[in-house]
Image (tube, helix red, strand yellow):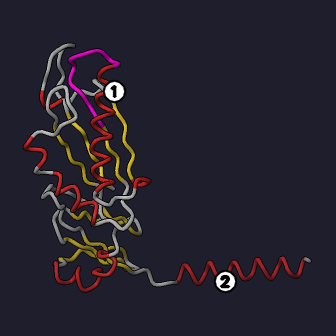
Amino acid sequence: MIRHLVRALLLAAVAAMVASCAIQSGTVVLLPDKDGKDTALTVTQRGTKVTLAEPYAGTKLTNEGPKAYRSSQEEVQAEFGDALAARPVGPVQFTLYFVEGKDELTDESKQVVNTVFVEIAKRPVPDVLVIGHTDAVGTDQLNDKLSRDRADFIRAGLIQSGIAPENIVAIGRGKRELFVPTADGVAHPRNRRVEIVVR
């Protein structure tokens, strides 16, 4: 028993020594923000910091610490293309607006519906959340029903277009989350909406 314990401790010590002697390497590159926003990243290794503050700024990790360098779109594609291609598609949100007091889309919003289908089709197993809203006109009970009717209307259209029903959740929020804050009883077209989140 003691011999096994001593052997296990020796193996652990050797493994720790090997790990401490291992060559530390790697590359970190700051990619451009898809919306063009400024971003930055600080890399710390062995007490040394390198800040990457512009697209394709990079650092190589070494035993002596991080070494700053300038990468490129071509290098990133060559070295990380497979990993980048494997990333899941990020969530996208759409807002569709309704005719006052109805579960009927405005003409402008009817034009957006195809874009929603395109985004859903990019995902092998889409997760779709449909949230109905109303303006501040009417009772809470009426608006709760109307907001749910609007969400169900959009959900039914998505199902009719081939989206599996189990991948779509529809809820109604009534007049609880006004996009444009108004007094009770005030109609506003931007509040009569359905938000669709596609993940």
The residue shown at (61%, 81%) is 17
Left or right, 2 with reference to 88: right
Q: Secondary structure at mark 2?
A: helix
The residue shown at (39%, 64%) is 125
Residue bearing the label numbered 1: 145
Query: Given this view, does label 1 or label 2 mark the residue nearer the observer?
Result: 1
Q: Amino acid at mark 2?
A: Val
Task: Tell me the quarter of the image containing the N terminus.
Answer: bottom right
Q: Quadrant of residue 127?
A: bottom left
Left or right, 159 with reference to 190: right
Q: Amino acid at mark 1?
A: Lys
Pick out the residue farthest to the front. Answer: 160
Q: Is residue 141 above or below residue 127?
A: above
Q: CA distance from mark 1 to mark 2?
A: 68 Å
Towards the viewer: 188 or 4 = 188
Q: What secondary structure predominates along the stretch shown in magenta?
A: loop
Q: Residues within 10 Å of mark 2 (few under 14, many from 20)?
A: few
Towards the viewer: 183 or 172 = 172
Marked residue nearer the N-terminal end (1 or 2)? 2
Residue bearing the label numbered 2: 14
Towards the viewer: 117 or 46 = 117
Towards the viewer: 21 or 61 = 61
Left or right, 130 with reference to 55: right
Pick out the residue farthest to the right. Answer: 1
Q: Which mark is residue 105?
A: none
Q: Which residues are magenta?
A: 132-141
